[in-house]
Image (cartoon, rainbow, N blue to C red):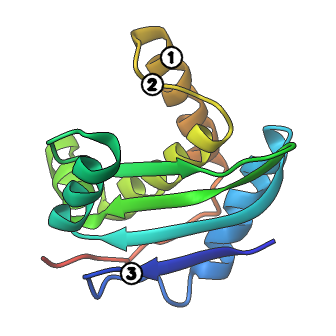
Amino acid sequence: MAITFNSEDTKFNIDGRKRETAAWMRAAVREEGFAAGEINVIFCSDPYLLEINRQYLRHDYFTDIITFDYCENGVLSGDLFISVDTVKGNAEEYGVMFHVELLRVIIHGVMHLAGYKDKTDPDAAKMRERENHYLAQAPEGLLEGVVYRR
């Protein structure tokens, strides 16, 4: 099935790198024991994601990703809304390259679809372990050079 990348209210995109990024995501899905269904990665701004957070989750704060899970019968499907504003800010705060933080957030959403949680310290540690595992498997240079200017 399809893994798509789109933008809402931002000009950010990963054109030219979509196929390789989708293949990396599919490999992670398979390793977790699932099939990849329709997974939509939607890049957006902080205000856009804040409104989604308020409307659907009743949370009044900024976040880097909101995952809507549509998984059924071992097939991972869902929408991953990613605020590139927050990803950029987090990359600066954590001292990592933007593209590395973006990959982490993308795979974080995939791990949510695979059933991983992050609300408790032990769950967050397991989530971080899976993120690191798949980041280490990312093709060298994946998304390198992708930048976002607010």
Q: Is residue 12 above or below residue 71?
A: below
Q: Position of residue 139 (x, y in %)?
A: 65, 63
Type of amino acid at the residue the image marks with label 3: Ser
Q: Residue 35's spot in the image, x, y percent?
A: 85, 53
Residue at 30% of width from left, 58% of height from top? 97
Task: Please identify the quarter of the rendering in which residue 140 is found.
Answer: bottom right
Vertically, is 122 above or below 92?
A: above
Left or right relative to 72: residue 121: left
Q: Which residue is mark 3?
A: 7
- Quadrant assignment for the C terminus: bottom left
Q: Which residue is mark 2?
A: 118
User: Horizontal placement of 122 versus 84: left or right?
Assistant: right
Quarter of the image where one finds residue 84: bottom left
Q: Which residue is mark 1?
A: 123
> Whole-percent x and y of residue 142?
55, 68
Residue at horizontal 59 percent and vertical 29 percent from the top: 116
* Image point (67%, 49%), residue name: 137
Secondary element under disc 1, as helix, strand or loop, is helix
CA gap between label 2 and label 3 equals 26 Å
* Element class at badge 3: strand
Answer above or below: position of 83 versus 59: below
Task: Determine the residue positioned at 40% across, 20% down.
Answer: 119
Amino acid found under the numbered disc labelled 2? Asp
- The three-letter code of the residue at mark 1 reads Asp
Secondary structure beneath disc 2?
A: loop
Between 106 and 60, the one nearer to me in the picture: 60
Q: Residues within 10 Å of mark 2 (few under 14, many from 20)?
A: some
Per the model, the C-alpha gap separating discs 1 and 2 is 5 Å
Cβ–Cβ below 8 Å for labels 1 and 2? yes
